[in-house]
Structures are given as structure tokens and as C-alpha cells.
Amino acid sequence: MRRHHSTTPRTARILGSLLLLAAAGVFTVGATTAPAKATATPLDRVVPAPASVTPGGSPYRITRDTSIRVSGTGEARRVGEYLAGLLRPSTGYPLPVTDKGSGGIQLRLAATTFGAEGYRLDSGRGGVTITASAPAGLFHGVQTLRQLLPAAVEKKSVQPGPWPVTGGTVQDAPRFPYRGAMLDVSRHFFTVDQVKRYIDQLALYKINELHLHLGDDQGWRIAIDSWPRLATYGGSTQVGGGRGGYYTKADYQEIVRYAASRYLEVVPEIDMPGHTNAALASYAELNCDGVAPPLYTGTDVGFSSLCVPKQVTYDFVDDVVRELAELTPGRYLHIGGDEAHSTSHADYVTFMNRVQPIVAKYGKTVIGWHQLTGATPAKGALAQYWGLDDTSAEEKAQVAQAARNGTGLVLSPADRVYLDMKYTADTPLGQDWAGLVEVKRSYDWDPGAYLPGVPASAVRGVEAPLWTETITRSADIEYMAFPRLPGVAELGWSPAATHDWNAYRVRLAAQGPRWDALGMTYYKSPQVPWPTR
Ligand code: NGO
């Protein structure tokens, strides 16, 4: 029997869970009581919630004899190697990746109806099979398998096991195609390794877009050969006056390559025409008065603007966009466009009318913050909404009108999903201009129905931005992103019918031991029933 897990009667679910526990040889009563021993995780205790879950049959147990079997393209094999790399340190098993034999863990590419990112996971006594149309689907299925294994699987040293996977079927595909996270590497610089660490954490929740905010008043972070001082001078500091830094082209390509290996597309952003002090400081000719301002290490916004009437501005933009597009296999190039308070409205419109075709000329699709809808968004452009629940009706109507005219939307409401907002007044990091955002608040809204007058088809997805005025270390990134980021990932991935805070908080709580095993920092929100040891 196949049933949608959100509509599964509670009694049937509890009974199913008891049977699973009994099958695993554990006699703990109650489906929501975390068993003390490593036992099979219920198939629906996964974040983001799978589209459909059908428990049943015997569990599979990963043992010393398990092989990882791959079919199809070289990419499927790479996903198999990635899975082996996850499982070998903690299981201590050899887990060879092979295209021979049957049983074990099988990654199968085959024609399916669940799209490029969907997958089916079948688990039974003989093995676990993940089937998908494309490697991205296999990769997402692997993340589900990972969460079905005990949290200790994430450790880097050999653990006792056992390593059971509950029997049954998960069939899954995303609700929205765009499920993003943004990292502001301008206010504080983060190294390639720090970005990779975050990418790995995002991949666990099936995030598929990594938006990098590469330029702002406080720092320019990407080498541009035709304007070298952008990086060497414009990148030489950060908020608070530290050393800053920038990515060489090789560094940046390494990030792009690593993200692709985790099925994330990198969306580079150069914020324009405002938020450009680092560029203006690097080249005097970009300023209307021809005078370069000093570097800036504060946190004010809205004071800088490229010089809209000067031709050199567009020569500059053309060079930057061309070089960035060359480094970008992804579809999008984000041009910012927020808080252009030092640019007149007429100049803003002129600027966007000249810059958007440059992005198109180099084969990329424009994304802009939603203020772009106050100009004329190019055909196919996406607008990223970062207003609040109580943003004015006029501003929301302007965004909705653009959406009705064909502009796609990515939703990042600041008082819901800005990861730099404090959880509570006591949160030591972050800001509170958009309010305090506890875990429930960031999860408990519906992207499909959030903005009035927006056709459902215009909503391409969600993104959780992390601005870094107060964030300097990986531990800070993690503390602000976890546990809110998985909720945003779930809003982007899971069917609306699965949305249920009370069920979600239990699934979220089960992630805590995994983050502990991974050595991650996170906020132990009192809204989440974290397991006690
Ligand atoms: C705003 C502003 C950023 C800040 C951020 C801090 C947008 C799109 N522009 O969001 O420059 O860093 O708030 O929360």
C-alpha cells in the first residue's frame, strides 16, 4: 500500500514504528521516544520531509560485506564514491564501489517520473536501492539514506554500529526548483575551506543553490584581471578593519567545482549600483567626482553608488560580468540592486536598463533583490524578495505585478529566513532590525501563499541569506544557520501537505546528535525537543 505520509493516520504510524522497533530487536514503547540504542530510524524522520513514505518489510543492515553498486554514468560512480567516503570512517567497513553483483547499496540511474532531482529509495532485507533519473537525484537519495542511519555514522572514527536502514520505500522530489543559501563573504571574508564546510552542511538538507555575496562596501572578494585593484585593494579589509581577503580565480573555481560535486549551483553576486564603496575606493574614475573614497569598515548601508552617467561605469560592469560569467557554469548572475539610496530613481532605472543586457550578453540570467521590480526586470529575470511580513502593501504589490508579468521570485523574507537575525534578545551574534526570529517563526510560513497576488508558478523557491556583519568564524555561521536553515530547506523541498510544526520539531530534534557527531555548533532552541542523552 502506498500512502502519503502526511495523511497516514497517527495510529497506523505508531503501529508501524513499533513494528520497526520490534524488528530491530528493541522494545521501546512510543513512536516518538528516541530509543537508547542505535536502532532503525523511521523512514519519515528525515529533513526535509520526503514527499511520500511507505514503511514495511525487513530492515537492511550495512555490514562489512556491503558493497556500493553503481550503474550508468561516471557521475553515478562519483556519487557512490562520495557515499563510501561518508560511511567508511565510522563503519570501518571497506564498502567497495563496483558495477558488479547485486544487493548491498545500489545507486541506479533509470528513467523515472520524479524529475531531475527526485529519487526513490527502497530498503529491504537484501539491500537499499536508490533510483533516479539523474545524478542529482541519486545524491539527494544518498542524503536521505544518511539521515536514516544512526547519527554516529557522521563521526570520523570507527563506531560500534549496528547500521540498520528501516525497510520500506521513500519516493521524493522537490516542491521548488530553487532552494538556496547565501553567504556574505564581503562583510567578513571566509576562506575556501570555510565555504566548503558550509557547502557540505547545506548538501545534507538538499539545498541546491549557493549564492555568494562577493562585493559590498566593505570588501571586493573576487579577482578581476582587467581591474586588479578591486581585489588587491578593495578586498584588503572588512567590517571592523581586519585583513579581509579575496578569492583568486583558481580559488573561486575550486568553490564552484566543490559545490557542483554536492549538486549546488553557485550564484555569484556583485551588488550594484549601491553597496559599491570597495570598488569606488579602488578606482577613482568610477566616482562621479573622480575622487576615490577611503575604504570602509563600518556597517552602514546606502551611502555609495556607481556613477550612472559615466561610460566608464559600463565598461567596468562589462569587464566584471564577462570575467565572472567565464567562471560561472551556473545559469545566474546576481546584480544586487538593493538599498540604492544614493542613486536617484531615474538613475537606478537607467543603470538597470544598461546592465541587465550585459548579463544577457554573457549568457547569464539576471537575479536582483526585489527593488529591481521598481525598474524593468529583464525577460526571464528573478527577483529576490527580502521584505518583511509587514512591508507596505504598495511594495508587495509592485513585486506581485512583476511576478504576474513573468518575473520569477525567490523568497527570502527577512523576518523569517534571514539567518543573521537574532533568535532571541540574548543571542550573542547577529542583528535585530527585522525582528527576533526563533526556529518556529522561520519555518512556519508558506512560500506558495506568502505574497498576495503572486501566481504560484512565479515562486521559484526560497533562499536563506546569512549576512556577516557580526559573523567571523565557521562556528558563527553554524550557530546562526542551525537549526533554522533546515527549516528553510524543508519549505523549499517538501510538499505543502507535510507542513506541520509539531511533527517538524521532532524530526529537527533528531538532527542534533548528527550535528554533534559532525562537530558543528548550533543553537539549542528551547522550541525543539532535543534528545537527552
Ligand atoms: C539587508 C541589506 C544588507 C545587510 C542585511 C543585514 C539586503 C538585501 N540588503 O538585506 O546589506 O547586510 O540587510 O541583515
Image (tube, rainbow, N blue to C red):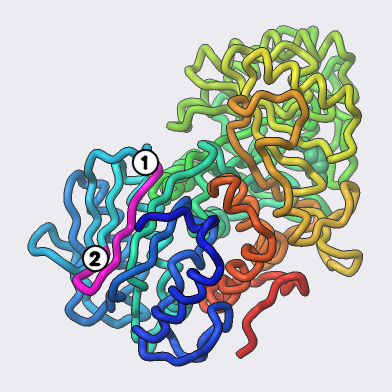
Q: Which circle marks residue 2 in the picture?
A: none
| Numbered disc 2: secondary structure | strand
Alpha carbon separation for disc pair 1 and 2: 20 Å
- In the rendered image, which quarter is residue 456 located in? top right
| Picture coordinates of residue 287, whole percent (x, y) | 82, 19
| Picture coordinates of residue 216, whole percent (x, y) | 74, 37
Residue depicted at x 68% and y 9%: 354
Nearest the viewer among 349 and 40 is 40
Residue depicted at x 45% and y 72%: 42
Q: Is residue 92 magenta?
A: no
| Picture coordinates of residue 229, whole percent (x, y) | 66, 33
Residue depicted at x 8% and y 61%: 100
Mark 1 or 2, which is nearer the eye?
Answer: 1
In the depicted structure, whether residue 88 falls above or below residue 249? below
In the depicted structure, whether residue 42 falls above or below residue 281? below
Task: Tell me the quadrant of the picture where the C terminus can be found.
Answer: bottom right
Report which residue position mark 1 lands on.
114
| Picture coordinates of residue 280, whole percent (x, y) | 78, 27
Nearest the viewer among 89 and 31 is 31
| Numbered disc 1: secondary structure | loop
Q: Is residue 124 magenta?
A: yes
Amino acid type, mark 2: Ile
Q: Which residues are magenta?
A: 116-128
Report which residue position mark 2 lands on.
105
Mark 2 Cα shell of 10 Å, populated few (<14), some (14-19), many (≥20): many
